[in-house]
Image (spheres, rainbow, N blue to C red):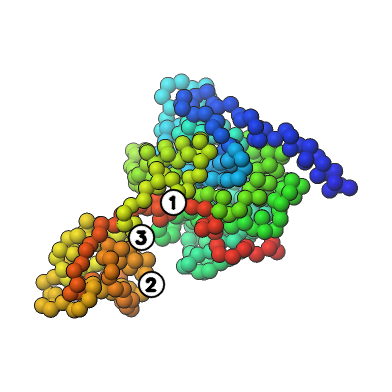
Amino acid sequence: MRRLTAGLTVLAGLASWPWLGAQTAPAADGPAARDSGRGTNILIVGIDSRTGLSAGEKRRLHVGGEGCDCTDVMMLVHLSEDRRRASVVSIPRDSYVEYAAPEGTTGAAPRGKINGAFKIGRGPLAVRTVEKVTGLSVDHYLETGFTGFEQAVNDLGGATVCSDKPLKDENSGLDITAGTHHLDGNRALGYARARHLDPPGDLGRVRRQQRMLADLLEGLTVRGALADPVKAADTARRLLRSVRTDVGTGMNDLIGIGWTLGRLPADRVEFATVPIAHFDHRVPGVGSTLLWHESRSRALWEALRADRPITGDTRILPVPETRAETNPARITVRVDDAEVATALRRSRFLVTDTSASAPAERPAGPPLITFPDGREADANTLAAALPGARLRAAARADGIFDVTVGSEPIVVKTVTYDRNVAEGAPVTADRLRCAGSPPPAS
C-alpha cells in the first residue's frame, strides 16, 4: 500500500513539473543575447571546501590541503525539449571569465577563474556567471561537497571506471591499476579530483569525470534505479541526502530529470568540454588560466540554445585534413633526410637531422619508423605525417623515434594536433564509457 501511495503521489506531481514547460526567468544583469532557449539546463557543481571536516575526515578523503571555497567541478546538463537527448558540458574550473555583478554592487564586474564566482556570491552568483558567459538560462542547480559526493556515489551503488594504464596521484589518493574497477565513494572522489596525472591539468581530469558519470548513469539504468517515476523517486530521495538544490528545484524536478536520463540510450547522451584556445593564459594576481576558444565555444552555446546535438558539429570541432591524436611537440625524432626533417618540424615534432650519416644507397621500400615499445599512439601520429611508412617497435630507453627514409618517393603531410580533441571533444556516452555493463551494486 505504501508503494502504491508513493506511486500515485509521484504521478500526480508529474503535471506540475516546471521543467516540462515554463522556464525560470533570466537574471537581470546578463547579456541581452541570453534567453531560456528550448529544453532544460541544469548546473551541477562540486565544492572545494574543508569547512566542517574533522582531521580524520580530511585524512580519509585525502583533502588535507587548504580549500579554495570555490567550485571544483562544474557541469552544465542540457535536456532536449523532446526529452530524447542529453548534452553534458564540463566547464573547466580555471576558465578566465567576467563574473556576473554581485547583488547590490555597481560598476564593472570583476574577472577571474570561473570557480571563484562561488566564493564571492555562493551558488546564486555561480549560476548567474554561467548564464552570463554562456548566454543560457539555468533552470536547476545541484551542489555537493566532498562528503556529499562520497555519500552520493555510495547511495547510487558505486562508480565504474576504467583505464588503459595505472593511475596514481598522491594528492587525491588515487591509486588504481590498469583495467576496470568498481569504486566506492571514497575512491571515486580520488578519481574525480586527480590532477597530477599524464597529461597533467584540468582537461584530462574533466574527461575522467565525464567517463565516470557516463558509467554511473549506465549503472543506474542497468539496475533499474530510474526505470519509472517510483524508482526514480527513491533514487532522488537518496540523492537529496547529499546534494543541495536551489529553491526552484524540488523532488518532482529531480524525479523528472532522473526518469528522463534513465530512458535515454547511451548514444543519445553527449559529453563535451568547452573548447579552449589558450591553456596557460597568465593573469597577474590570478595565475595560470584557460581562455575559451571564442568562435567554437560560441557555437557550442548556440547549439544548446537551439536544442541541437553538439556531436558532429564542425563549428564546435573543426575536422583537420590530417589529425594528430597525440602531441607532436612531445615526440623526439631522428630523421636521415634533411628535407623530411624540415617538413616534420612544421608539425612541431622535435627533430634532429641525421642526414650527414645517412647511407649512400637508400634501403628499398617506403620509410621505416622505429619507435619505443609502448609508444604506439605516438608512432601513429608520426605515421600520419608520413603516409605509407612502415612501423617497427623496439626496446629502447631513450624514447627516440628513428625515421629511415627508403628508396620510394615520400610525401610529408602537416598534421594538426588539437588538445581539445584529445581531452574534450564532443562524444556520445557509448564511446566514452567503459566496455561492457557496470556490475550491480553490492
Q: Mark 2 points at which residue?
A: 374
Above or below, 49 against 422 in this view is above
Q: Which of marks 2 and 3 is nearer the N terminus?
A: 3
Q: Where is residue 348 in the image (x, y as percent from the top left)?
A: 25, 57
Q: Residue at x 41, y 24 (%)?
A: 108
Q: Position of residue 398 (x, y in %)?
A: 28, 72
For the question of whether residue 231 can be seen, the reply is yes
Q: Which residue is drawn at 65% across and 43% down?
A: 257
Alpha carbon separation for disc pair 1 and 2: 24 Å
Alpha carbon separation for disc pair 2 and 3: 14 Å
Q: Residue 326 carries which label?
A: 3
Q: Which residue is drawn at 74% across and 34% down?
A: 15
Tell me the SS state at disc 1. Answer: loop
Q: Say which amino acid is labelled 3.
A: Thr
Neighbour class for label 1 at 10 Å: few (<14), some, many (≥20)? many
Q: Say which amino acid is labelled 2.
A: Gly
Q: Which of marks 1 and 2 is nearer the N terminus?
A: 2
| Between 284 and 238, the one nearer to me in the picture | 238
| Between 335 and 39, the one nearer to me in the picture | 39
Judged from this view, the residue extending furthest toward the right is 1
